[in-house]
Structure formats: C-alpha cells, structure tokens
Image (cartoon, helix red, strand yellow):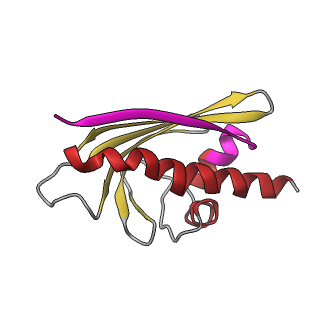
Amino acid sequence: MPLEFTIGCVIDASPLDVYKAWLSSTGHSRMTGSKAKVSAKEGETFSAWDGYIEGRNLTLERGTRIVQAWRTAHFAAAEPDSRLEVIFKPYGERMRITLHHSALPPHGVQYKTGWVTHYFKPMKVYFSSLEA
C-alpha cells in the first residue's frame, strides 16, 4: 500500500518568494545548500540534491501551489513516481509551507524526516539570513 504524509513549517519570507526560489535553479540550490536544476514551467523536468531527486512539474499556481511527480535514486525503475504537493500560505508577516507527499513506495517513510532535515531547516536559515 502506498505511503503518504503531510508536514509543514513557518518560514520568514513571503509565499511568493519561497515559491519562486523553489522553481529557480539558483534559488533552490541556495535555499537547500545543494545543486538543483529546476524549471518554472508546467510539464518540464527538474532535479535536486545533485540529481538524487528528479521529477516533473504537474501543476504550478504562482505563489500558492506546486504539484510535482517526484522520485529519488532509491526508487526502483518499476516503481511509479510519487506525488508532491506544496502549498504556500501567508502566516502573519511570514509564510507557512505545507507539503503533502503521497503515492510513495513502501520504503519511502524516510522522506518525511528528509524533508525536515534537507529542506525545512536549511530554508529557515536561508530566508532568515536574507532579512539581516
């Protein structure tokens, strides 16, 4: 049975700033601390974490929502892509990012911790440093 989970955090930035960084090769690389090649167009492919993550943009709603087909190098070739939905909402003067990751293979439970460690924590540091 496929796995799924929802997690989120608050970041010191606007929803549009985080959305734009997520879909920019330079911004994505800077906010995560690892090389990414990203597109801001529906239907186009992306890679992150030096090619460990790859996928395709399915739905892009400027400043509010990203839906992607998503997989890592740990997915077997026969396993289908998972589905990643990222929601960006104002939260006072900051923003709340909510991530729903679904259709993960049975071995995908580690990605919940991975999102916190490799995305949310470095994103908080990156966007806080822009305020200084």
How many numbered discs, if any? 0
Q: Residue at x 23, y 49 (%)?
A: 107
Camera-side residue of 8 and 55? 8
Measuring from the top left, give residue 24's x and y in whole percent.
57, 59
Q: Is residue 84 above or below residue 52?
A: above
Which quarter of the rendered picture does the N terminus lie within? top left
Q: For the view shown, which residue lies furthest in the left direction? A: 78
Measuring from the top left, give residue 102's x and y in whole percent.
32, 36
Give the magenta-colored segment's residue range.
1-18
Say which quarter of the image contains residue 93.
Answer: top right
Q: Look at the image and say whether residue 6 sits in the magenta stretch.
A: yes
Camera-side residue of 99 and 37? 99
Q: Residue at x 37, y 66 (%)?
A: 52
Measuring from the top left, give residue 50's x and y in whole percent.
44, 72
Q: Is residue 113 left or right of residue 79?
A: right
Residue 78 visible (yes or no): yes
Say which quarter of the image contains residue 96.
Answer: top right
Q: Residue at x 69, y 47 (%)?
A: 17
Which quarter of the rendered picture does the C terminus lie within? bottom right
Q: Residue at x 75, y 43 (%)?
A: 12
Measuring from the top left, give residue 120's x and y in whole percent.
58, 48
Say which quarter of the image contains residue 126.
Answer: bottom right
Residue 98 visible (yes or no): no
Q: Look at the image and say whether residue 58 sits in the magenta stretch.
A: no
